[in-house]
Image: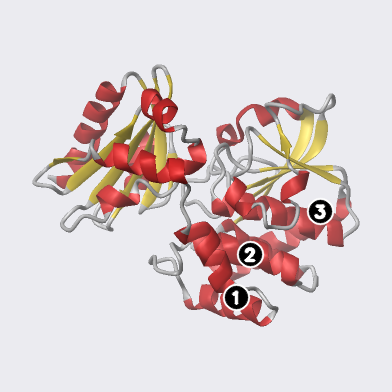
Amino acid sequence: MNHATEYSQQLAAAATFIEQHDDFLVVSHIQPDGDAASSTYATGWILTQLGKSFTMINEGTMPSKFSYLWGSDQVLDYGKEVPERLYQTIISVDCADFSRMGRISTLFDDQARLLNVDHHPTNDRFGSCHLIKHDAAATVQILYDLAIHMKLVPNLEFGDCIYTGLLTDTGGFRYSNTSPEVLQIGATLLSLGVQGSVIAEQVLERVTYSQIVLLQKALSTLSFANDRKLAWLAVSLADLELTGASSDDLDGLVNYPRNVEGVEVGMLFKEKAVGVIKVSLRSSGLVDVAAIAQSLGGGGHVRASGCTIQGTLEEAVAKMVQEVGNELI
C-alpha cells in the first residue's frame, strides 16, 4: 500500500471516529508550542462545525501569544480546573507518545477510545485510531486535510489556527519541512483573509521584556564541544526566578546555539525542577537528533527533538555532550 492510499484510509477512519462519537476530550502535549496550541483550537473548531460537544484541556496554561486564536479562551488548565468526571472519547493532537499528555490521562476512562493525530516520526501509535503523517510539516496540516475530507468549509477563524501552526513549525516557512503543499495551503488561507504578516509579527518577531533578559542570561552560558560542532545554552531555576521568565519565554532559545556557523547540533538545557532537566535538540541535518532523544525516552523529528534527563544541569550537559558527541565523531 502506498503512502497516499494509507493516508486516505486514515483520514476516512478518523472522520468515522469523530462522526460516530461525541463528548470529546481534546488534549495536546505538555508545554504546548505553536503547533500544539493551534491544533487544539483547530480540532475544537472542527468539532463545533459538526455539532459535537467537547472539552479542550492541557496540563498548564496555553502560551499567551496565541490568545488571538479561536477557542483560546475555552481551554481548561488542568492545574486549576480539573473536571470531576472521566471521558470515554479522546482526541490527542501533536503528541508523539502517550506520556506527552502528562496528567491529563488520569481523566481517561479505562475503556476510553483515543484518536491519535500527529506528525512526529517517533510517534509510537498509541490509541485506538491513528491519523499520522510523518512528512507533514505540522499537525495542523493534517487537521486541515481532515476538515477538507469531511467537507467542512474553512473560514478565517480556522484559517488563523492552521496558518499559525504551519508558520511556527516551519520557522516562518524557512525550514526544510516547507513543502509545496505547505505553501499551497498557506496561499489558500491568505485568500481567506488570514493576515500572515500580523501573525508573524505576533508569534515570531515580538519578544517580552522577561524573554530578552532571559536571553541575555542564557547567552552567557554558551558553550561548545567537538571542534565547535556542538553548542548549547543552559537555563536554571534560579535564572527563571531572577528574570521573572515563564516557560513561554524559553521558546526559540535553542536556535541560538544551533545557528552558530559550523555548529551541527544545538542544545538547550532547561531545569524544570530540582533534578529534572528538559533538553531540546536542534540539528543542522548531519545528526538525527530524534534517534538520540528516543534512546533517552524522548522523541520528535530528525532535526528537532527533546528528552528529559534526571540529575543536575551539569550531569545532564555531560551526558548529552557524550551522547551527541558520539554521533559527531
Q: Mark 3 against mark 1, which lies toward the viewer? A: 1
Disc 2 on helix, strand or loop?
helix
208 and 74: which one is in front?
A: 208
Task: Write down the residue under mark 3.
Answer: 18
139 and 4: which one is in front?
A: 139
Dividing the picture into quadrants, the one containing residue 171 is: bottom left
| One can see residue 322 in this view | yes
Mark seen at residue 267? none
The residue positioned 49% from the left and 78% from the top of the image is: 180
Quarter of the figure with the N terminus = bottom right
**Which residue type carries mark 3?**
Ile
Label pair 3/2, CB-CB below 8 angstroms: no
Task: Write down the residue under mark 1.
Answer: 185
Q: Point out the tag, 3 or 2, that comes first from the N-terminus.
A: 3
Q: Point out the tag, 2 or 1, that comes first from the N-terminus.
A: 2
Q: Point out the tag, 3 or 1, that comes first from the N-terminus.
A: 3
How many C-alpha atoms fall within 10 Å of the one at disc 3: few (<14), some, or many (≥20)?
many
Q: Is residue 263 left or right of residue 13?
A: left
Disc 1 on helix, strand or loop?
helix
The residue positioned farthest toward the left in the image shown: 227
How many C-alpha atoms fall within 10 Å of the one at disc 1: few (<14), some, or many (≥20)?
some
The residue positioned 91% from the left and 57% from the top of the image is: 51
Q: Quick check: 76 above or below 34?
A: above
